[in-house]
Image (spheres, grey):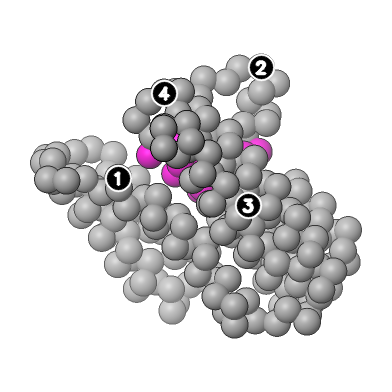
Amino acid sequence: MNGKGTVLSTSIGVGFAVGLYGISFGALSVAAGLDFWQTQVLSLLMFSGGSQFAFIGVIAAGGVASAVPAILSAWLIGVRNGFYAIRLNSLIGVTGLTKLLSAQLTIDESTAVATSQNEPKNQKLGFWLTGAAVFLFWNSFTALGALLGTAVGDPSRFGLDAAAAVAFLALVWPQLRTMQANVVAGLAFLVAVVLSPVLAAGLPVIAAGLVGVVFGWRNWLGVTEVNK
């Protein structure tokens, strides 16, 4: 399969895997008190899985009165997309109104697929195709989950809670080719595991991301290529 075909199949596969988890979001959102249309608009406009789950989690715990903390929690988790945008700006080279569309599609998965490509044209293709695929599947399955409501139950029953994580790990794994990358990834993982029992959902991931930024910004260990 040529480079373009590989990017296409990867984008669709990632989009579908991540989209499946939208079923649980739709169901949990309705269970938290949002109706179908509120759930769908939230998914279409926010379009950041971690932020969306954080939002409905706080709403479910505190009701409408907790709207402000819910928004702040969602915003904190979504900050990482801003860092992605800085990295992607030089890869996809968007200008004008196209920046608004690219901003909406700047997520974990589109960033991972884009940065995993070697050729500039495939980087751009990977970003747009993956972003579009995730957007389509995520919102479609969110609608399905909202219609099914609480009948879906716990997403872990179907393994949907692991689908997005596994897909993302498969994309990131090939990038761990240097000692620096491996050490930073291991340290970030350790921080997330240690903080998970003591911090609210989503915050350990932010902490791990900050570790990656701080320790990965400079090549403190010296980049040594790992044999493929």
Q: Position of residue 193 (x, y in %)?
A: 36, 72
Q: Which residue is label 4 attached to?
A: 120
**Dots 4, 1 in contact, CB < 8 A:** no
Residue 17: mark: none
**Dots 4, 2 in contact, CB < 8 A:** no
**Mark 3 or mark 2, which has the lower sequence index?**
3
Q: Does the magenta segment cover residue 180? A: no
Residue 156 occupies which quadrant of the picture?
bottom right
Circle nearer the viewer, 4 or 2? 4
Packing grade of label 4 (10 A; few <14, some 14-19, many >=20) is some
Marks 4 and 3, how far apart at CA: 26 Å
Marks 3 and 1, how far apart at CA: 23 Å
Residue at 88%, 66% in the rendered image: 35
Q: Position of residue 95 (x, y in %)?
A: 61, 17
Marks 2 and 1, how far apart at CA: 31 Å
Magenta span covers which residues? 104-116
Q: Which residue is label 1 attached to?
A: 175
Does residue 42 appear left or right of residue 115 in this picture? right
Q: Which residue is label 2 attached to?
A: 96
Q: Which residue is label 3 attached to?
A: 48
Q: Amino acid at mark 1?
A: Gln
Q: Amino acid at mark 4?
A: Pro
Residue 1 occupies which quadrant of the picture?
top left
Q: Amino acid at mark 3?
A: Ser
